[in-house]
């Protein structure tokens, strides 16, 4: 393997609102800032640790929401952080980052969401370096596919096509959140990966693909300043971003590009999409309860009880989530904890009345 | 009926800690001070309203815990409030009040717990006046019995004996909290009443009965000051109360006295012993949920959701209590809401660790 080029870069996407951890997650402290990783670290902090295995500190860029910039800077001191004036999903964000990196002489850059967990960081680094090596040699758009272990209906799927190299394939098709039966068929067939939202490509290769698929987006993004600090870049984004469509990079670019590849991940991956997913990684008491913070469970089995800033008490329950955080309470069955967005919508509607 | 004597009196017992409404109830704001009555009034306030139908303001005495005196005074302005230095259950409390009333020339006094609900106040007043009339004429100890409508196992029961007058009987036996099968037999038999904890008697008749059953208690209580204000009485209680046994008036006096009668209540009565009991009196939404305060129920049926000082949200639940009050959270099934004391014990043990 060649020595790693010193202009390899990483984009960390940290603009999500992570509502499925309500009431722990709040607009001002979304999932990526919560202490959900081992030892109470934030998901963003461990994402940065992974990024620093791939690129030097000065080659890392974090994109987030304007109102989260200060919190992200506190979590990631010394890293370039740019606040988006409005949320526009991943296609405009990655396009803007490609312009940032292009103006700074970057080689390939990896795109890492900030709210996922990976335990086997060495395996991740090996895969990511291989992807970046390939992206530096070829004009390809590399996506990281996670072997689909079970029929998740909240994930996007990538169907692999022809084999290109070991664990690297052309992409036959992207599918967003399939119905249960279809997801089961995907898992049984062995040709589908979960779309991890992690990618690798060169700045100009991505911008060319964006120009081919969405010239309306590529034009203004290419014109972003090639020099200057984060504030200058933010000011330029203020002129450009609001007019762009909010659309994912999968829909806007990858589904249309002929040079999209998928690399089969050799590392574990967890999107921690719910309280139930989080609890699977926590220690349990002798009756299978996960007790976190100021939590009391009396005659409970397999419950998740979380108290921060107050006591959360569960009495005589099974398979329930009882969370008291940030001055709010959530109670639901663990198996329904991926529907918490229903609650945040209801709370918003109440507030709006 | 004779005109009501102007020295008739009422003792309101307001020293309980009402833990079954945790986390709404707290040691410093127990059940009788919560807004559990119609229109958000406290149970103590509506008890005082009932008392004022029986006796003039200056003939009412409220006994409570020392640390609750200020809160009780705010709820009952202009009423004599005496704080007990230590909690000693109802026998010492009623004995002390009998001494207070005896020293102030009272006729019969009614004893009213401060944490029960009665809707038909007119019927209550009729029964209470009849009881007081009888207590003024005869040397009797009158207890108010509630026709046992269902086999509650958390109540004390009174078995009636020979009939004395319309709806007034001798007492055959007191039974504390019977097992379910026995409670069912009581209800089927039609000879048993729930012990409401409400009584009527003259001060000297009660003190004589106490002297007969528990001379060790009657002696020091009879010696309490016959004059002076609440502070003087409290100071005297400080010398007397700590040495007295904590025991209920039923155990200490009524079970042993030959002159105990029971009057069958013609009014409704609810001890509001749990979240479930409280909810039975609240308005419900179209799916049977009781939503109180800042409460959200998504896809829930027959749930109780209470949010005070924060949002309580329930998702996809049936027949559950989800309460967020005073910075703490409780979740349990409604049918288990009378076991909340298990939780307050567990919380105390945590705090003590």
Image: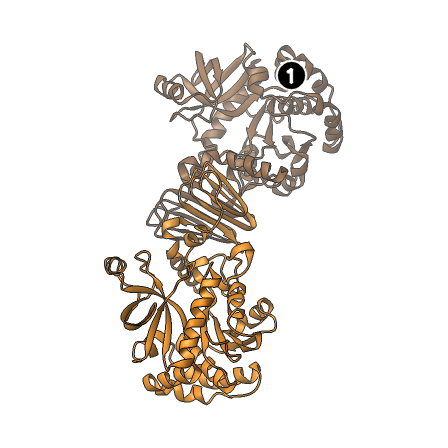
Chain colours: A brown, B orange
Q: Residue at x 31, y 60 (%)?
A: B153
Q: Position of residue A116 (x, y in %)?
A: 50, 33
Q: Nearer the viewer, residue B340 or B58?
A: B58
Q: Residue at x 53, y 58 (%)?
A: B35
Left or right of B235, for residue A297? left
Quadrant location of residue B255?
A: bottom left
Q: Residue furthest front?
A: B1
Residue A273 seen anywhere in this rendered image of the structure: no
Residue A264 seen anywhere in this rendered image of the structure: yes
Q: Label 1: which residue?
A: A207
Q: Position of residue B124 (x, y in %)?
A: 45, 65
Quadrant that contains the C terminus of chain A? top right
Q: Nearer the viewer, residue A43 or A84?
A: A84
Relative to A212, say whether B73 is above or below.
below
Helix, strand or loop at mark 1:
helix
Quadrant location of residue A191?
A: top left
Q: Position of residue A318 (x, y in %)?
A: 35, 44
Left or right of A259, for residue A288? left
Q: Chain of mark 1?
A: A
Q: Position of residue A15 (x, y in %)?
A: 61, 32
């Amino acid at each position: 393997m060649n020595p790693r080029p010193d202009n390899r870069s990483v984009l960390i996407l940290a603009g999500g609102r992570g509502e499925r951890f309500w009431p722990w997650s709040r607009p001002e402290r979304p999932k990526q800032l919560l202490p959900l990783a081992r030892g109470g670290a934030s998901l963003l902090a461990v994402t940065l640790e992974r990024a620093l295995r791939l690129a030097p500190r000065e080659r890392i860029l974090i994109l987030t929401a304007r109102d989260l910039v200060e919190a992200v800077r506190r979590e990631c001191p010394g890293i370039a952080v740019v606040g988006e004036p409005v949320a526009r999903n991943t296609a405009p964000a990655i396009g803007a980052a490609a312009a940032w990196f292009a103006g700074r002489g970057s080689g390939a850059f990896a795109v890492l969401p900030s709210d996922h967990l990976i335990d086997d960081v060495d395996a991740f680094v090996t895969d990511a370096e291989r992807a970046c090596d390939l992206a530096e040699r070829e004009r390809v758009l590399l996506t990281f596919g996670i072997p689909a272990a079970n029929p998740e209906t909240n994930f996007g799927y990538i169907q692999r096509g022809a084999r290109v190299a070991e664990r690297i394939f052309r992409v036959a098709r992207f599918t967003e959140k399939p119905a249960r039966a279809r997801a089961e068929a995907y898992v049984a067939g062995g040709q589908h990966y979960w779309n991890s939202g992690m990618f690798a490509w060169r700045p100009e290769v991505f911008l060319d693909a964006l120009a081919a698929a969405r010239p309306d987006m590529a034009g203004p993004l290419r014109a972003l300043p090639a020099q200057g600090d984060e504030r200058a870049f933010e000011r330029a984004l203020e002129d450009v971003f609001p007019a762009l469509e909010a659309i994912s990079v999968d829909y806007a670019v990858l589904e249309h590009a002929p040079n999209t590849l998928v690399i089969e991940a050799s590392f574990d991956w967890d999107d921690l999409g719910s309280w139930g997913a989080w609890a699977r990684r926590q220690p349990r008491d002798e009756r299978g309860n996960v007790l976190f913070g100021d939590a009391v469970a009396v005659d409970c089995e397999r419950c998740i009880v979380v108290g921060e800033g107050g006591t959360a008490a569960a009495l005589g329950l099974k398979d329930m989530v009882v969370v008291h955080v940030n001055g709010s309470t959530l109670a639901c069955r663990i198996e329904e904890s991926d529907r918490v967005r229903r609650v945040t919508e209801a709370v918003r509607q109440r507030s709006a009345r």
